Image: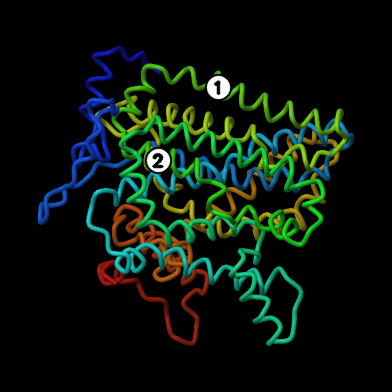
């Protein structure tokens, strides 16, 4: 990475994208400047925004890590010793940031797109909400049909409705359920974040303190002890991962980052390297707690890697800051030109929602049919990485294929990409024509339909 001094910071602030490129953004508020963010005048034309390359990278990497946390957890069975199982669970604990980053990105994108603008709830759900709700329901029904025991039609329907409501059709679908919950409260969240965000440090401090208290009470008194044995305790422990308020810190962080994107970027360009130290501290808290629960309290590995532990507030926040710092440095490395591999990460970002939806089924199939065949002489870390990589590559390939198929792209919450991506469209047409010519040559022109004809490239391309 090239070093960027103060002139570079000023230059890149001028190139900043997002709210600062589309409308005025308040400076870091002080006692003198507590004014609300500027709101566009009624009827003012909506300015186009440049692309947020760093969000593409963060969203894509988070989706890959979602596959990773499940792949690493599933393949603990490959460990040959207690020490190996402990080390692998330590990796699982380190990858448990995915839901927090997922919600931070969601809040960032929503505030970036809708804060201080006219907001129609019905229009929002028609354009974006249904793009999440419909795939969620369809894939829930898919998992009910292909991964769960068969039931009589009436009982199957009742189970499916219950699982859709609770996010239980598959182990990863609570991610999507959290998105739907957030979309339902989005109008109120936008009002809150723009009002309370006038004092960002106060809001961030209060939110962080509330998160620490919430996680401490949950980890120490709700997940164990007398309350855990009650009906209410069992329900909370079973479904607390679906409760949106549990992730309030991540939503606040994402919202504030969108409101003050220019200031956040300038701050990270100057001090972002310190986030690595904070990240190491947060990871030390997670791994220290894991060792303490295994060797001191003897409450076990499962309790030691629990997501809802106080150290996760420090770790997930530090990782979000570090992640954004790295991604933003990458995005401006060649400015004003697009960063390297930007089209690759943009494509992964486009299919990231599909990765959340589909990867569970792919991973189950890999664990059932591929993992038992892996050579025993191969080191366990290599086998784990192979399962992770195969699940990622297979899932991405399916999602990319769906992205370029009319109507099928809606299964991953995206519009058909062929119309806007002409380069890929031409490539697919050429591939289709090549396959057609190949099949006709194999037939040798001896089919009942008569001799093979030369395809009309102009007509086929137009169609």
In this rendering, the answer to whether 241 lies above or below 142 is: above
Residue 165 placement: quadrant = bottom right
Towards the viewer: 341 or 166: 166
Secondary structure of residue under mark 2? helix
Task: Report the Cα–Cα distance between label 2 and label 1.
Answer: 22 Å
Towards the viewer: 204 or 438: 204
Towards the viewer: 320 or 238: 238
For disc 1, the neighbor class at 10 Å (few under 14, some 14 to 19, many from 20) is some
Residue drawn at (83%, 45%) of the image: 77
In this rendering, the answer to whether 371 lies above or below 52 is: below
Asked whether the residues under the numbered discs 2 and 1 touch, taking CB atoms below 8 Å apart as contact, a structural biologist would say: no
Residue drawn at (77%, 50%) of the image: 371
Towards the viewer: 180 or 353: 180
The residue pinned by badge 1 equals 278
The residue pinned by badge 2 equals 55
Secondary structure of residue under mark 1? helix
């Amino acid at each position: 990475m090239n070093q960027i001094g103060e002139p570079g910071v000023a230059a890149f602030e001028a190139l900043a994208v997002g709210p600062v490129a589309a409308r005025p953004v308040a400076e870091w508020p002080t006692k003198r400047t507590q004014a609300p963010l500027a709101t566009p005048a009624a009827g003012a034309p909506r300015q186009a925004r440049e692309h947020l390359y760093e969000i593409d990278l963060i969203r894509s990497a988070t989706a890959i890590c979602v596959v990773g946390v499940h792949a690493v957890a599933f393949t603990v069975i490959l460990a040959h010793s207690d020490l190996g199982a402990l080390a692998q669970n330590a990796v699982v604990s380190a990858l448990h940031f995915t839901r927090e980053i997922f919600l931070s990105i969601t809040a960032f994108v929503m505030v970036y797109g809708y804060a201080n603008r006219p907001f129609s709830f019905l229009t929002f759900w028609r354009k974006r909400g249904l793009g999440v709700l419909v795939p969620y329901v369809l894939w829930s029904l898919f998992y009910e049909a292909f991964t769960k025991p068969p039931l009589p039609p009436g009982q199957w329907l009742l189970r499916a409705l219950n699982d859709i409501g609770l996010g239980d059709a598959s182990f990863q679908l609570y991610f999507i359920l959290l998105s739907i919950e957030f979309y339902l409260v989005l109008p109120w969240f936008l009002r809150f974040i723009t009002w309370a965000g006038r004092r960002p440090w106060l809001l961030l401090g209060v939110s962080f303190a509330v998160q620490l208290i919430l996680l401490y009470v949950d980890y120490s008194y709700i997940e164990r002890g007398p309350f855990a044995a009650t009906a209410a305790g069992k329900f909370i422990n079973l479904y607390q991962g679906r409760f949106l308020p549990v992730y309030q810190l991540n939503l606040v962080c994402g919202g504030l980052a969108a409101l003050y994107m220019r200031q956040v970027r300038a701050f990270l360009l100057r001090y972002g390297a310190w986030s690595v130290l904070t990240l190491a501290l947060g990871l030390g808290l997670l791994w220290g707690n894991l060792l303490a629960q295994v060797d001191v309290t003897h409450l076990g590995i499962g309790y030691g890697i629990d997501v809802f532990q106080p150290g996760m507030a420090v770790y997930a926040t530090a990782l979000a800051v570090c992640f954004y710092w790295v991604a933003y440095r990458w995005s401006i490395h060649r400015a004003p030109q697009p960063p390297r591999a930007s089209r690759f990460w943009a494509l992964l970002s486009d299919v990231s929602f599909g990765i959340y939806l589909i990867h569970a089924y792919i991973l189950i199939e890999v664990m059932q049919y591929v993992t038992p065949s892996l050579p025993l002489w191969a080191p366990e870390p290599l086998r784990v990485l192979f399962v992770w990589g195969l699940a990622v590559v297979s899932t991405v390939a399916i999602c990319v294929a769906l992205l370029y198929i009319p109507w099928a792209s809606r299964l991953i919450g995206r519009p058909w990409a062929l119309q806007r991506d002409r380069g890929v469209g031409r490539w697919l047409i050429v591939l289709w024509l090549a396959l057609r010519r190949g099949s006709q040559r194999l037939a040798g022109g001896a089919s009942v339909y008569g001799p093979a004809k030369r395809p009309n490239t102009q007509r086929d391309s137009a169609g």
